[in-house]
Every structure is written in structure tokens, then in C-alpha cells.
Amino acid sequence: MSRTERECKSCGYVFDTYFMATMDYCKRCVPSVIELAKAIKLFPDIETLHTENERYETALERLARLGNEPELGNSIGNVIVQEALKGGE
Ligand SMILES: [Zn+2]
């Protein structure tokens, strides 16, 4: 391998960095690597989202009944939360 040659970290193809914008990936892999990085950023860990969602839902259920437990409340605040919970179904 010459000084300007690199092995692609994704596919193992040996390419010449003299012609490349990146030092780690060949021309074929660069677009997919960029797309993958974007996708990972756009879709955070699904398990974390699920846990957060459950936490918010538990808090909203309590607020929906606040002041009239264990039945649903009828204050403006209770109703706002009840409507928010309905929207999530
Ligand atoms: Zn490659």
C-alpha cells in the first residue's frame, strides 16, 4: 500500500486518498455512511423513548384525576390532560 492508499473501514476496498474527501471510507461507502449517521441522529434509542413515554403517561393519568381521585376530575386542568391522553391512543 502506498502512502495515499487506505483500506475502506466499511468494505475493505483499497482506495487512494489522493482522490478522496474522506480518509476512512471509499467512494462507494461514503454516501451510505453519511445516511446511516443521519438516521442514527434522527431515531434515538427506542427503549429510552418508551421509558420516557411511560413516565409522562403516568404523570398525566394522575393529573387527569387530581382533586377527584380515583375518578377523573372535571376542572379545566383535568380536562386538558384527559384530552391529551385521548390524543395519544
Ligand atoms: Zn467501502
Image: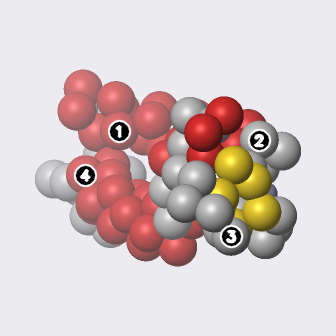
Q: Nearer the viewer, residue 57 or 67?
A: 57
Q: Residue at x 47, y 32 (%)?
A: 83
Ligand 1 quadrant assignment: bottom right
Q: Answer above or below: position of 31 versus 46.
A: above
Q: Which mark is residue 27?
A: 2
Q: Which numbered mark, 3 or 4, is in the foreground of this view?
A: 3
Residue 54 visible in the picture: no
Q: Specify few, some or many for label 2: CA neighbours under 10 Å numbering under 14, 14-19, or 20 or more.
A: some
> Could you tell me the amino acid type at mark 1?
Val
Marks 1 and 2 close (CB-CB < 8 Å): no
Q: Which residue is mark 1?
A: 81
Q: Which residue is mark 3?
A: 1
Q: Specify few, some or many for label 1: CA neighbours under 10 Å numbering under 14, 14-19, or 20 or more.
A: many
Q: Which mark is residue 14?
A: none
Q: Answer above or below: position of 1 versus 33.
A: below
Q: Which residue is mark 4?
A: 63
In this rendering, position of residue 8 left or right of residue 88: right
Q: Answer above or below: position of 6 versus 23.
A: below
Residue 82 visible in the picture: yes
| Label 2 beta carbon within 8 A of ligand 1 | yes
Mark positioned earlier in the residue sequence (3 or 4): 3
Which secondary structure lies at badge 3? loop
Marks 1 and 4 close (CB-CB < 8 Å): yes
Find the distance from the CA under tag 1 to the CA under tag 2. Answer: 52 Å
Mark positioned earlier in the residue sequence (1 or 2): 2
The N terminus lies in which quarter of the figure?
Answer: bottom right
Q: Residue at x 35, y 38 (%)?
A: 81
> Could you tell me the amino acid type at mark 2?
Lys
Please tell me in which quadrant of the rendered image residue 65 appears. Answer: bottom left
Find the distance from the CA under tag 2 to the CA under tag 3. Answer: 18 Å
